[in-house]
Image: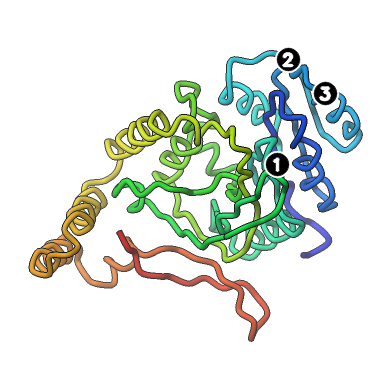
Amino acid sequence: MRLTNVPKISVVTPSFNQAPYLEACLSSVLNQKYPNLEYIVIDGGSTDGSVEIIQAHQSSLSYWISEPDSGHADALNKGFSRCSGDILCWLNSDDMQTPWTLSTVADIFMEFEDVEWIQGWNGFWTKGGVMVHPMRNPKNIYSYLTWNYHWIQQESVFWSRNLWRKAGSQINPDYKLMVDVELWSRFFLYADLYHVDALLGGWRNTGENRALMNKEECHIEALKAIATMEDRIDRKTLRCAKTFRLLSLLRNNTLTRMLCLANLLISFPSVKNLINAAGYREIRWNDEVHQWQRMRSPFHS
């Protein structure tokens, strides 16, 4: 990482009664010693010892507060309203970043100035804090429009202040669980998502995660967010997405696949435009030249 003129990265951690995991979360960010970090912690009035953990790190925090809030979105909006960084993200208090996260993110945003948001590999921590079965999981707008939203993993997502501003500068308080899916649905209206081949963070399976305990409600909220996005996209993108949906449903019927593909190609002026629209945007490390490089990979529904 370049040691001078690095972008300011703002990290928001919302928390409520997560003392068993909070120390590991805070340390995963602060121990990276990123030279231009703005770390904001919003606690919802915890009574389990969380406040004492936060106070032990307060000299390294840009801001923290512990007071009741109206839920996850409210806590995040409190935090983001105080952010001044060039790059933004949030990290829930039972999750963690990797030791190289912030420097890698800074390098990529400095190298590719037109990139506005990125995701890393999906990472999964055990309850005890061991990283297990990480997976490459690129997504784009067509993934969402074919309802394949599992998952743009929020713990590994970073975005520019400019994109945040264009998308409304807030977390939608009407969503109880899938605030991330709703935010990504708005981001897709303004920018391509780039998948970075690196582990930047991970979700911890505590056995009490809200998404695990409320799967059906999560699914309903996710489809609501995607439907709202669908109402705002251009006709060409929607036509392409509908074709992909049909292909996905009828993937075992060779004749149907050929007919659908023909319909898809008719929707675009050239095959090149089709590939550009539907392929995944990726940033991978090239060992030969020792730098990050952009690539494209085919879309799969």
Q: Measuring 77% from the left and 38% from the top, which residue is drawn there?
A: 39
- Of the numbered discs 1 and 2, the one sitting upstream in the chain is 2
Q: Amino acid at mark 2?
A: Glu
Q: Amino acid at mark 1?
A: Gly
Mark 3: few, some, or many residues within 10 Å (few <14, many ≥20)?
A: few
In the image, 79 versus 6, the foreground residue is 79
Q: Amino acid at mark 3?
A: Gly
- Pointer 1 residue: 85
Give left or right: position of 38 versus 124: right
Q: Position of residue 288 (x, y in %)?
A: 64, 86
Res 216 → quadrant: top left
- Pointer 2 residue: 67
In the image, 88 versus 152, the foreground residue is 152
- Pointer 3 residue: 49
Give left or right: position of 22 versus 113: right
Question: Is the N terminus in the top left, top right, bottom left or bottom right quadrant?
Answer: bottom right
Question: Is the C terminus in the top left, top right, bottom left or bottom right quadrant?
Answer: bottom left
- Badge 1 marks a residue whose secondary structure is loop
Mark 2: few, some, or many residues within 10 Å (few <14, many ≥20)?
A: few
Give left or right: position of 297 versus 213: left
